[in-house]
Amino acid sequence: MPRPTAAQLAYGSATVVFSTVALLLLSRTTTGLGVALIGVGALLLGLLVALTMPVPAKTRTKAATRAAADARVPRPRAEAAAPQSVRR
């Protein structure tokens, strides 16, 4: 599983903070259970936002390049060191 990028962490964290504040202000709850439910809901929303962000193209390209490099077959040394034609 790839590591989350800085953007994913930032957007997920910002979503948790802002959605918690917004839901607490809108619901005007004062009970501990209500605050806990809002907190859990905000955490789930932040996780959803962080996981649904698209992966940067650089990361996808790096993984594809690594897979292609592993699949390459090296050329025999005789071909690589073949003598050049003589000029006349």
Image (tube, rainbow, N blue to C red):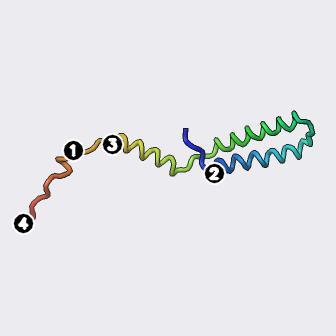
Q: Is residue 55 left or right of residue 81?
A: right
- Mark 3 and mark 1 in contact? Answer it, CB < 8 Å: no
- Quadrant of the frame with the N terminus: top right
Question: Mark 4, residues whose alpha carbon is within 10 Å: few (<14), some, or many (≥20)?
Answer: few
Kind of element beneath mark 2:
helix
**Residue matched to label 2:** 7
For badge 2, the amino acid type reads Ala
Tell me where residue 55 appears, x and y as whole percent: 57, 46
Is disc 4 in contact with disc 3, using a CB cutoff of under 8 Å? no
Instruction: Report which quarter residue 84 is drawn in.
Output: bottom left
Looking at the image, which residue sits at the far left?
88
Describe the element under mark 1 as helix, strand or loop. Answer: loop
Going from N to C along the chain, the mark reached first, 2 or 3, is: 2
Earlier sequence position, callout 1 versus callout 4 = 1
The percent position of residue 47, horizontal first and vertical second, equals: 69, 40
Sequence-earlier tag: 4 or 3:
3
Kindly report the distance in space between the C-alpha atoms of the residues bearing marks 3 and 1: 13 Å
Kindly identify which residue carries mark 3: 72
What is the spatial separation of the Cα atoms under label 4 and label 3, in whole angstroms? 37 Å
- Label 3, secondary structure: give it: loop
Q: Residues within 10 Å of mark 2 (few under 14, many from 20)?
A: few
Q: Amino acid at mark 3?
A: Arg
Q: Is residue 31 left or right of residue 39?
A: right
Q: Which residue is mark 4?
A: 88
Q: First in sequence: mark 2 or mark 1?
A: 2
Marks 1,4: beta carbons within 8 A? no
Which residue is labeled 1 in the image? 76
